[in-house]
Image (cartoon, helix red, strand yellow):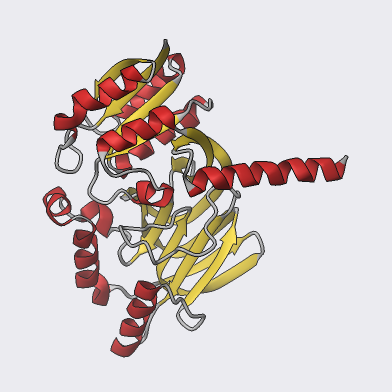
Amino acid sequence: MKKLLFVYNPYSGKGLIKSHLYDIINIFTAGGYEVTAYPTQAKRDGMRKIIADGSRYDVIAVSGGDGTLSEAVKALMQLGIKIPLGYIPAGSTNDFASSMSIPKKMKEAAKAIVEGVTFDYDIGEFNGEYYVYVAAFGAFADVSYETSQVSKNRFGHMAYIAEGIKRFPFYTGYNIKLEYDKGTIEGNFIVGIVSNSTSIGGMRKLISNNVCFDDGLFEVTLAKTPQGAIAVQRLIREAATSNLTEKDFVTFKTSYLKITSAADIAWALDGESGGSHKVVEIKNHKQAVSFIVRPDDKTAEQHLLHALSSDKEKESAQ
């Protein structure tokens, strides 16, 4: 039998995994896996477990919020091996699951791991630390890790939005210099997002166009600092409707960027604190982690199209 390591956070979200644990393990076992289940005991415990034992397994599956998933990715990147990684979302927002169309119902997500195919997903590196889908600074960025777990469990992603709106008037923006693949940008920005996702903080419309999860490029969105109440309202309206105008936003794709500022800027990585920095370097590791997705997903179809395109390019080169 193939071996599967199942690492789960028993307290993530509302702790629903406790009532689904038997069904999940049974689905894995019926699917032909010898399962080792490991409940995490503290922050980064899942990461330590995967680093210590992950190489002995054919598949790794994790359940929890975005933080649990991020730990698994960090561990696999440190191991430097492509072990297929499955995800059963159990958090309050689950941005990654939304982007990759992973079922929100736990038993369905477990079945998708057993029946799925692998998809090689781009991973980010932030000053030497790996992250899965988003690095962000400014308004809303620190909200994700400062919002109480009680509020997250009760209100889901609306807890983030409510807390962010409450703080918005107190942000004055940051003067930054940004160097990227195609040049340099300087200015004052209230928000900066470097992502590989169609869902940020539960908001699916903010970045939804032309996102490709395996092209080696980040989607970068910078919101210019608004001057006055009317400008603030316009910026929020544009973000909510995914109508990002050049007057209020700067958007582009890049595989690398360096951001320099005179003052420390607080960052969030996958909804967790990324620390405060004056200089930040972010790199894209193309197709670095193999996630398991449903074979009928648009992501799996995208992977097939990408493979066919690569084959055609090789034939043309010959």
Q: Is residue 245 left or right of residue 303?
A: left
152 vs 301, nearest the viewer: 301
Say whether residue 3 is visible.
yes
In the picture provided, is 298 more to the left or to the right than 43? right
For residue 41, say whether it is visible. Answer: no
In percent of width and height, residue 224 lies at 44, 77
Residue 153 x %, y %: 15, 49
Please name whichever residue, 228 or 198, is drawn nearer the observer in this view of the structure.
198
Residue 101 in the image: above or below residue 167: above
Give the farthest residue toward the top: 1
Q: Residue at x 34, y 79 (%)?
A: 237
Coordinates of residue 230 in the picture (x, y in percent): 31, 89
Q: Horizontal and vertical percent for residue 123?
A: 50, 43
Figure check: 279 above or below 37: below
Residue drawn 58% across the image and 43% down it? 303
- Number of callouts in the render? 0
Asked if 22 appears above or below 116 in the picture, the reply is: above
Residue 27 occupies quadrant: top left
> From the image, which quarter does the N terminus lie in?
top left
Residue found 45% across the figure and 75% down from its top? 188
The C terminus, quarter of image: top right
As drawn, which residue projects farthest toward the right? 318
Q: Name which residue lies at 28% across and 42% down.
A: 65
Judge whether 266 appears above or below 46 on screen.
Answer: below
